[in-house]
Amino acid sequence: MDIKDLIIIGGGPAGLTAGIYAGRAKLKTLLFTGSVLGGQLMLSEQIDDFPGFPEKITGPELIKKMAEQVKKFDVEMIEKNVISVDFKKRPFVIKTDNEEYLAKSVIVATGASAKWLGLKNEQELIGHGISACAVCDGFFFKDKVVGVVGGGDSAMENAITLTKYAKKVFIIHRRNELKASKKLQEEVLSNSKIEFIYNNVISEIKGKDSLEGIYMQDVNTQEKRFLEIDGLFISIGYKPVTDIFQNQLDLDNHGYIKVKENTQTSADGVFAAGDVCDTKYRQAITASGLGAMALLDVDKWLR
């Protein structure tokens, strides 16, 4: 069988940037985009913090440009999901639903997805009032009223970021105490723009073309009430896409790939980049940076 120098698993900013660098390095490369090219970035309606696009760009447009650049360097791209891997064999074995591929090295860039509430209208309103990233989308809620769902560090960080833009920020939490670090709790509790709604869950999201508000339900009394807000930021955690790497790579307690020496995983010759191993930044630009780093590490490892 044909043995590739490199197989990249993932078609988001990390995987595509790695593909661009692989093409420039003249490595015989195959890139699996998954069934949907672009990953989480495809949900972004407007991006104005990615260098080189001062007039703003949508997530799908940015991914399209990245993919065109990958193809320019003759990197083969396949829109399929990888369903299993074997990193204990040499060469490595990568399987899709109907094919088997071999590679000397692998970059895992499968990303992470935000956990959502699973309510009706939620997915349809992503980018139209609903988001999971205040750093990415907070700017679009200047002088608006917004809500943040969650009680951990990411929820508090999103709320603090949103106070730079919004006139009012509600933090909605299902419990009567926060899980966030004491330092973050002190910061949000002292911010006059932030108001807490404890012991409540969101039971319904209202809006057709844009978010109109939410219905909340008290977990103790079951009483429901409507809250009119312009934006809702879901901050209940992220789930890395690593199920197929169980028993193949060392993962942390939350399922993220552990890396050492920048992008090297526990399997020699297998590297990771982007949100699949980044528990802190989760930005398109940092994912791209890690994709470039992973390819440079691969190139050196192959030599």
Image: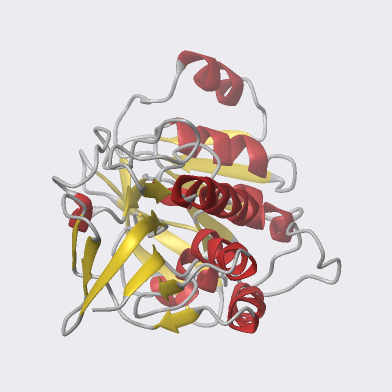
In the image, residue 280 sits, relative to residue 105, either above or below, namely: above
Q: Is residue 167 above or below residue 132?
A: above
Quick check: 247 left or right of 111? left
Q: Residue at x 45, y 68 (%)?
A: 39
The residue lying at 34 percent from left, 80 percent from top is 35
Counting from the top left corner in percent of width and height, residue 262 is at 50, 35
Depicted 264 relative to depicted 217: above or below? above
Residue 31 position by quadrant: bottom left
Is residue 165 or residue 10 the one in the foreground? 10
Q: Nearer the viewer, residue 220 or 64?
A: 64
Q: How many marks?
A: 0
Q: Position of residue 263 (x, y in %)?
A: 46, 41
Q: Is residue 267 left or right of residue 295?
A: left
**Residue in front for this viewpoint, 98 or 253:** 98
Image position of 193 with respect to 110: above or below: above
Residue 197 image position (x, y, % from top left)? 43, 38
Residue 196 appears anywhere in the view: no
Determine the residue located farthest toward the front in the rendered image: 303
Q: Quadrant of the N terminus?
A: bottom left
Colouring mode (rainbow / by chain / secondary structure / one colour):
secondary structure
Does the image show residue 60? yes
Kindly indicate the quadrant of the structure image that contains residue 97: bottom left
Q: Nearer the viewer, residue 138 or 193?
A: 138
Q: Residue furthest right?
A: 54
Tell me which corner region of the image, top left, top right, bottom left or bottom right, holds residue 70. Answer: bottom right
Residue located 42% across and 25% down the image: 180
Q: Identify which residue is drawn at 52% across, 33% down.
A: 156
Percent x, y of residue 243: 20, 55
